[in-house]
Image (spheres, rainbow, N blue to C red):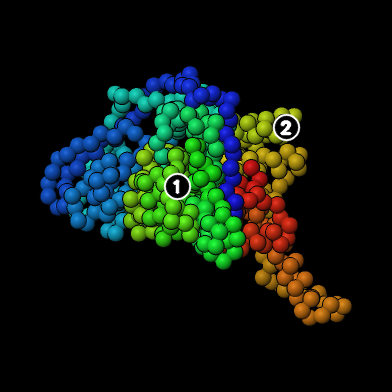
Amino acid sequence: MEPRVTPGVNPGINPGGKTIPRFLRATPAPRLELKIEREAGKATSRVVVFDGDALRLGSHDANDVVFSDPHVSRFHCRIERTPRAWRVIDQDSLNGTRVSGVPIRDADLPLPDCRIELGDSVVLVTEVPSVQSVEILDQPSFGDLYGASFPMRRLFAMLERVCESEANVLIEGESGTGKELVATEIVRRGPRSHKPFVVVDCSAISPSIIESELFGHVRGAFTGADRDRVGAFESAQGGTIFLDEIGELPLDMQPKLLRALEAREIRRVGDSKPRKIDVRVIAATNRRLEREVNHGRFREDLYFRLSVVTVRVPPLRERLEDVDLLVRATLDSLDAQSSAHLFTPEVLAEMRRHNWPGNVRELRNFVERTVVLRGIETRRDAPEPENTSAPTKSPAPIGLELSFREGKEAVIADYERSYLGSLLEWANGNVSRAARKAKIDRMSLYRLMDRHGVRHTAHGSKDDD
Ligand SMILES: Nc1ncnc2c1ncn2[C@@H]1O[C@H](COP(=O)(O)OP(=O)(O)OP(=O)(O)O)[C@@H](O)[C@H]1O
């Protein structure tokens, strides 16, 4: 998979990296008060007031609330603000998290007050009215990102700040929530907007060649390396590299990336000469990297290097009030405003009830399909297929014009084509999701798609976007 290189994301928007006008507004938002009543089995009475969107609890110093308790994991759990409630999420801690005595993995906090137990520590959590307000953007879009809901306007306000800085950014969010759009917008409005923007999908590159993809190689470095090759970091010189699906980066590659970021230099594979790099790193993941750190699947030091600023993109189910706006924005982008009548109030209400596991990508595909089919009569709304277990049909007679081997290959090819069609439709064109569903690696899926002439970009996961 070749990295995608864009010479400059959008030089028009922010010439010279000047500050752009802001439309930020302060709005009151409830806060949480956390009173640590017991720590490592001993009574205590520390109080922490939290008015952000995500709070980390654990024994590592990098948490927002740090516990000196040997039974608390490094990143034990986190609390997140969602439009509906405050949510507590266990980060696969060793000893688990309990809310009011009940073990949880992911649960809404039963407020106005409740107790969270972790290790031998207990925290009393209480919701308190806000005296301080949070910043939100006073407009329902941020570049190509649309969202009128509170969490999206909060995100836009945060992005305003992030755009001004040069810090490394980690973007967290489920598949299809717009992480790549967020990265593009950060670059477009930042001081490096005229410089190269290189996108690398870490999950689409086989582990054996990822080092060469990132850092390049010299001729003769390995079998098949018949010429020198510039890697993604050198291509991004002076600009930005977007490491998509960073959670998929193989463990043995992680210290090499860390070294490159710390020393600000890379070494092409097979070369002894270090080369200086000046590259801003934006990474994205749909995994919770803190969990990966707890499991030892992601290096803690690299996690900190990448997450100087962490931006969380909320899933669509946490902001269903954005559905109407996203439908309108999609119709505009398709130049299909004349199809707006297909999205009656009933259809929109139905769409707001849907869970959208594929998030905005799935919603966009749905709108596009509806426009093409001129109505809502799509596969998703069709009745479930009938139970096929009984009675079974007798198999169709088989022609003997082909040899056994040719016939078998033709049947397999037919099966592969149908399977691919259904799989990609199910995944809304998202190759990562499709590969996970089919339980094959992405490289094999790409090969299969190539074999059957199914269109995809070199980068891969944004095929239909
Ligand atoms: N807030 C939004 N407003 C408008 N379009 C959006 C928004 N969020 C996502 N999209 C659209 O949804 C599609 C998926 O977005 P994107 O590729 O940025 O998601 P992603 O989180 O990077 O996905 P993945 O995890 O699969 O890589 C794109 O067509 C994008 O334009």
- Above or below: residue 156 compared with residue 284: above
Q: Quadrant of residue 13?
A: top right
Report whether residue 326 is seen. yes
Q: Position of residue 149 (x, y in %)?
A: 49, 30
Q: The disc labelled 1 sits on which kind of residue?
A: Arg
The label on residue 275 is 1
Q: The disc labelled 2 sits on which kind of residue?
A: Ala
Q: Is mark 2 within 8 Å of ligand 1?
A: no
Q: Nearer the viewer, residue 24 or 252?
A: 252
Which quarter of the image is occupied by the N terminus? Answer: bottom right
Q: Which SS class for mark 2?
A: loop
Mark 2 and mark 1 in contact (Cβ < 8 Å)? no
Q: Position of residue 195 (x, y in %)?
A: 53, 34
Q: Which residue is at the far left?
A: 43
How packed is label 1: few (under 14 Cα within 10 Å), some, or many (20 or more)? few
Q: Residue at x 22, y 57 (%)?
A: 71
Q: Quadrant of residue 418?
A: bottom right
Q: Which residue is at the far right?
A: 401
Q: Earlier in the sequence, mark 1 or mark 2?
A: 1
Q: Position of residue 296 (x, y in %)?
A: 35, 59
Residue under numbered circle 2? 336
Q: Which SS class for mark 1?
A: strand
Q: Residue at x 72, y 73 (%)?
A: 392
Q: Nearer the viewer, residue 146 or 341?
A: 146
